[in-house]
Amino acid sequence: MSWSALFERAAAFDVSVEAVVAGLAEWRRERSGANDADRPRGPDGAR
Amino acid sequence: MTEPPAEPSGPSTDPSTDPMARVVADADVLAADLLCGGPARAALDLVRAHDWVTLVASEPLLADAEAVVADLADGDLAADWRAAATDLATLVDHPAGDHPALACAYRGEARHVLSLDDALLGARAAVNVRARVETSVKRPDAFVRLFDPASMYEVVVGGDYPGPDRDPRG
């Protein structure tokens, strides 16, 4: 499927950038646990 | 941790391995490209329009974006987006606990990370990131302003810039 077709389908949903940012933050919090989700972790595992 | 291979210098015989031409888009930018357009789409159009620019990603990174798209739009669109993104990107492996975008930059030797996450974009975060990964985290609009394909082509590929070599929406 072309990118144009994907963008056309996506346009049917009224999604803001703020909703995307909040959605990802919530998803990653749920996935990794609320205790340490607020700080990014580097590729060597250190914070 | 296993170190990535040595960085090539000067125009590369394989431009796709030059870190300057390797870009990671965090899951928020990937989802915003699809769902919102704007600067995120302009930034990824630059990647899609040039065969010598490589989008680096990982399965966890794409899974994050797919989950956001499924939540905010629908699962069918998310699955079709995942297939297209997998075709476009060069995938790397990284430990499950790492931040996907930073780990992709490290493992995939990408000099550019695009993000909308203030936790990655702040000055303090920049210092922490640069201490571990030779990359720069930028908002998509900053990447669009700074990434000049013509001058980048001279450095990465060599010769005169021939213009876009792919349809970014194809």
Image (spheres, coloured by chain):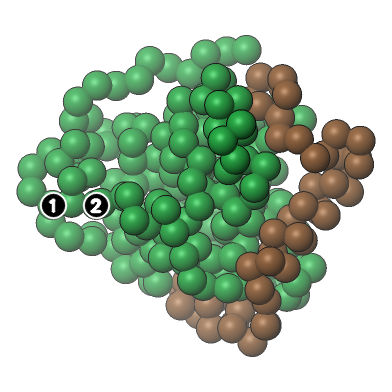
Number of numbered discs visible in the structure rendering = 2
Q: Colour of chain A?
A: brown
Lateral position of residue B60 relative to residue B53, left or right: right
Comparing B129 with B23, the one in front is B129
Which comes sooner in the sequence, label 1 or label 2? Answer: 2
Tell me whether circle 1 and circle 2 mark residues in contact (CB < 8 Å).
yes
Judge whether A43 appears above or below B87 on screen. Answer: above
The tag on residue A31 is none
Q: Are marks 1 and 2 on the same chain?
A: yes
* Whole-percent x, y for residue B51 in the image: 30, 52
| Quadrant where the image shows the N terminus of chain B | top right
| Amino acid marked by disc 2 | Pro
Among the chains, which one is green?
B
Residue at image coords 40%, 51%: B143
Considering the numbered disc 1 on the image, is that residue within a helix, a strand or a loop? loop
Residue beneath the point at 61% across and 31% down: B124
Q: Is residue A44 above or below residue A37?
A: above
